Image (cartoon, rainbow, N blue to C red):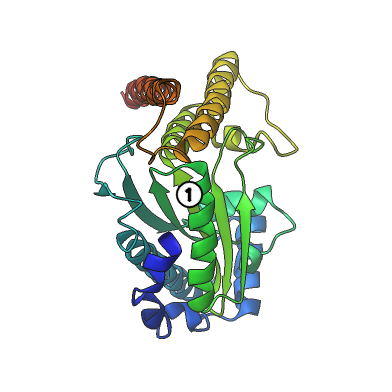
Amino acid sequence: MILEQRSKGTGFIVCFMSVLRENPPVSRNRIHKMGSALREDGVVATPDDWEAYLLHQTEIVGELVKQLDDFAESNSAVLLGGETMEKNIVPGSGAYMVSGRPKTIISLKEKLRRMPKTPLERIHDVAGARLDCDVTLTQQRRIADELCDLFTKCGATRVDIKDLRDGSHSGYRAIHLHLRFPAGFAEVQVRTALQSHWANVYESAADIFGRHIRYLHEENQVPLSLAAREAVKLLHDLSAHISQVEEKRDECSSVHSRDDLDYDMKHRQEIISELESSIQFILNLLDEEFRKVRASRKK
């Protein structure tokens, strides 16, 4: 089991001396004023404070990534494909990918203006890390639960698990962990292979049609062009199809290890694998088309 393997590691010991347990170098009041100035005037007031703040966020990301790397390596029985350097994870590979980033000032300004009642010190994903992995929906939830336990041992005073797999967030599906440490807020995302691939392609679409297509589930929607509406509908429909296929894969996984599988079940698993390959093929085609559009606009 994932929990048993992970509990035998040394990651928890490392956490005791991590940046996650340290207070931020900039006071909460100063961070609040920095965010207000960025939202209202679009300016970076007190540059030295911003430099210290962003450096600290980068250090938080580094620690989150380290913990996710250690966690994934200790779960080789599930993530048997190991870490991949490919752009997207192939379903059935058992591979995983860990990444992280602090938000840029530009993206922070955008978020602060989109969420006018949320101060900078309360934004939960300034520091963010991600574990993309070839797992079933049940395994995905189990990993999220175990990461909750891990980061609590790393000093988190609160961990909220947000299950976003119902598709109500503009087609985006994942499980997010909202973490609160003495160092500040952070977010960790856990996504399956197809959830991750879809999200990457949708990001490419947002680069073309506007970042606002990521927030169609929120109020104050921006009108979309005909091309944008068609692309968004296609991707939302594909997201729903991915959800259905992943649910079927999850149902089959409970009997996957049995030697006495009947013909119907084996045939069903083969169909699911074919559907996953087809979805990946379509996502690759869309990604390539969006890449061409971006390239043509730069000419």
Q: Nearer the viewer, residue 246 or 106?
A: 246
Q: Which of 78 and 216 is in front in this view?
A: 78
* Circle 1: residue type: Gln
- The residue sitting at 66% across, 64% down in the picture is 36
- The residue sitting at 59% across, 20% down in the picture is 233
- The residue sitting at 52% across, 35% down in the picture is 251
Q: In this view, does 256 lie above or below 152?
A: above
Neighbour tally class for label 1: few under 14, some 14-19, many 20 plus, Cα within 10 Å: some
Residue 142, given in percent of the width and then of the height, sits at 51, 55
Q: Name the residue under label 1.
A: 139
The quarter in which the N terminus is drawn is bottom left
Residue 239, given in percent of the width and then of the height, sits at 54, 28
As helix, strand or loop, the secondary structure at mark 1 comes to helix
- The residue sitting at 70% across, 60% down in the picture is 118
Residue 297 appears in the picture as rendered: no
Q: Which of 153 and 266 is in front in this view?
A: 266
Q: Nearer the viewer, residue 94 or 223?
A: 94
Q: Locate residue 156: give its quadrant.
A: bottom right
Q: In this view, does 25 lie above or below 269?
A: below
Relative horizontal placement of residue 179, taking residue 277 as reference (left or right): right
The quarter in which the C terminus is drawn is top left
